[in-house]
Image: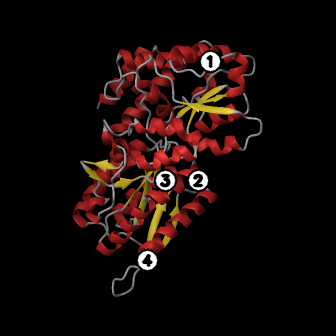
Amino acid sequence: MPPAVRPQARRITALLGSVALVLAAAGCGGGAGSGSVSGRVTSLTALDYYTDASEHAQWSERLTACGRTAGVRIEHRSVPGASLVPRVLRQASSRTLPDLLMLDNPDVQQIARTGALTPLDRYGVDTGGFTKSILAAGTYHGKVYGLAPTVSTIALFYNKDMLAEAGVGVPRTWDELKAAAARLTRPGRYGMAVDANATFEGTWQFLPFLWSNGGDERKLDTPQAAQALRLWVDLVGSGSMSKSVLNWTQADVHDQFVAGRTAMMLNGPWRISAMERTRNLHWGVAPIPVRAPGQTLVTPLGGEVWTVPRSSSEARRQKAARVLACLTDSTHMLATAKQYFTVPSRTAVASRYTEQVPTMRAFVRSVERARARTAELGVRWPRAATGIYTAVQAALTGERTPEEALRRAQQSTTGP
């Protein structure tokens, strides 16, 4: 799924220390679901941000099925994405955490840091067969605290009819991308579209260009990072990409594409179901171009992980771990991936998946080399992400050169 947009990230970070102190002093109570007087656990609570009615119902069915394997009933609640982490921090302080908690993968480390989560190895949850980056997304200080049933990333979507009419091949390098976007641009239509807005989504879309060119969020003021940002500046400056990308969300980019107002776009696989319902839209998907042949494409890893919060009841944690293990077994993993056009987290399952859903091949290939956003900076990632999207905005508006914008970003990331 797309990365959550959380303007309150700095305020949340400031709360972590106090929550950790509370947990260290008292431990977590947790689990509003009930059991009998004898201690037998008959129900568990689960919390996520799947507030869409259809998606909530689908996850309720999946949780119910996995709860049945553990012999418990699941009380499933969903809250808006922006309010999930603040709610979790409040519940951690009051010792009322749910038994099962879904988190966007970049949030796992900051929640684990408070002591609110339980390492999954205590309950024998199978973590075999996951790619290194997927495990890293749910890991804090060497311990796995969360597992994702499926994951996602982004790729290049293109309109087959428009490319054929213009005699343009699918671009594989940045030069090819600029040339193709220029030839595809005409009145009422741009050649290329991205989400470059001032949120974590904007950073998410820029990361493949930064990382694949050898850039690094630990040091943003490098020639490699400037080259990546210059590419976007050139696309806007040449008229091949609309200046409106400064305000577009990934949903807006999708709308431009299906309406025929852009020939190519960056987006995630969660858009495929809507595109398949669009009449007369003939589209393809390919890996995001790299600057030079031979470079390795590195994209950001998206998706949610399920965790088992700490509580005073060992029996509840054991039951919750059984449900989590069920959600991440091969059968449920494959079913979830097919339902949402995401990528199974276990490599062997992903291989079978591409044979059954060929449109997902580019995403499966990219996930193999995808990187967790917190892999390098851990809980300091939100500050770097803010610096990156601020630099993108400054460069695309012409306020600063790519070099100047990234120098400012580096200063803001490393400053007090």
Is residue 313 at least partly visible in the picture? no
Rate crowding at label 4 as few (under 14), some (14 to 19) or many (20 or more) other CA atoms within 10 Å: some
- Residue underneath mark 3: 83
User: Which comes before the other along the chain, label 3 or label 1?
Assistant: 3
Which numbered disc, 3 or 2, marks the residue closer to the eye? 2
User: Which comes before the other along the chain, label 1 or label 4?
Assistant: 4
- Residue underneath mark 2: 339
Identify which amino acid the numbered label 3 is placed on: Ser
Rate crowding at label 3 as few (under 14), some (14 to 19) or many (20 or more) other CA atoms within 10 Å: few
Is residue 373 at least partly visible in the picture? yes
Q: Which is nearer the eye, 2 or 329?
A: 329
Determine the residue located farthest toward the right in the rendered image: 279
Residue 89 horizontal/vertical position (percent):
38, 56
Which structural element holds mark 1? helix
Identify which amino acid the numbered label 4 is placed on: Gly
Residue 15 horizontal/vertical position (percent):
34, 50
User: Which comes before the other along the chain, label 2 or label 1?
Assistant: 1
Q: CA distance from mark 4 to mark 2?
A: 25 Å
Which numbered disc, 3 or 1, marks the residue closer to the eye? 1
**As drawn, 31 above or below 184:** below
Which numbered disc, 2 or 1, marks the residue closer to the eye? 2
151 left or right of 416? right
Which structural element holds mark 2? helix
Q: CA distance from mark 3 to mark 1?
A: 39 Å
- Residue underneath mark 4: 71
Which structural element holds mark 3? helix
